[in-house]
């Protein structure tokens, strides 16, 4: 598990995970960007994956959706520097927990816009996911992921990714890869 110093970015509140009715889908370019992010992680193209993140990035996998990451332990709670460090570590290929490396494929579905902020050019998108991992045996990781994407002159950038595992709080095998 990884825990780093608290950041000034708010956690995704639990009430953002459920909506009273249908929500609009994201724009096609945003959906394509999120599918691309998933493919890069699946294909172990870590440096390209890292390049998608903006400078104020936050990558969070909480133990419980309502937890405050500044007060409770998280599976992953990485700022931009820690993301860079994590990717450098993955790029070495010297990770006992990933020898041999996992083969992965993930599916994203039910993409919905939770919030759009024209002032800062961000869009918050939720999606269900299933990640199939094979390393000696097959495991399935599933849950809800909340992305915050920013439109910049250089293109779309990932501001945050919060992964709510359905198995959170229970025993979780190593997360020695990008979920």
Image: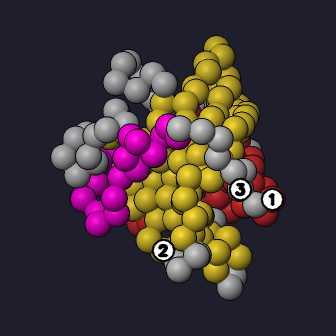
Q: Where is residue 77 in the image (x, y as percent from the top left)?
A: 37, 50
Query: Looking at the rendering, in which quadrant would you find the C terminus?
Result: top right
**Image quadrant in which the N terminus is located:** top left
- How crowded pointer 2 is (Cα within 10 Å; few <14, some 14-19, many 20+) is rated as few
Tags 1 and 3 touching, CB below 8 Å: yes
Residue at the spot of label 2: 55
Q: Measuring from the top left, give residue 142's x and y in whole percent.
A: 58, 27
Q: Earlier in the sequence, mark 1 or mark 2?
A: 1
Q: Tell me, yes or no, whether the highlighted magenta stretch contains residue 131.
A: no
Describe the colour scheme in one phrase. Answer: secondary structure
Residue 10 occupies which quadrant of the picture? bottom left
Contact flag, marks 1 and 2 (Cβ < 8 Å): no
Q: Are there few (<14), some (14-19), or many (20+) residues within 10 Å of tag 3?
A: some
CA distance separating discs 3 and 2: 23 Å
On residue 28, the disc is 1
Q: Name the residue under label 3.
A: 26
Q: Does the magenta stretch include residue 4?
A: yes
Q: Which of 16 and 137 is in front in this view?
A: 16
């Amino acid at each position: 598990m990884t825990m780093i110093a608290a950041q000034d970015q708010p956690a995704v509140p639990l009430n953002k995970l459920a909506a009273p009715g249908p929500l609009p889908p994201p724009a096609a370019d945003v959906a394509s960007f999120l599918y691309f992010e998933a493919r890069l992680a699946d294909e172990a193209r870590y440096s390209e994956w890292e390049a998608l993140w903006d400078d104020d990035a936050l990558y969070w996998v909480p133990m419980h959706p309502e937890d405050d990451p500044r007060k409770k332990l998280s599976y992953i709670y990485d700022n931009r520097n820690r993301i860079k460090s994590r990717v450098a570590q993955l790029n070495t290929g010297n990770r006992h927990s990933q020898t041999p490396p996992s083969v992965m494929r993930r599916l994203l579905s039910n993409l919905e816009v939770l919030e759009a902020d024209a002032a800062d050019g961000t869009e918050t998108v939720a999606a269900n996911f299933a990640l199939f991992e094979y390393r000696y045996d097959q495991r399935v990781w599933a849950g809800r992921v909340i992305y915050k994407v920013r439109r910049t002159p250089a293109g779309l950038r990932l501001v945050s990714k919060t992964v709510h595992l359905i198995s959170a709080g229970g025993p979780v095998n190593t997360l020695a890869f990008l979920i």
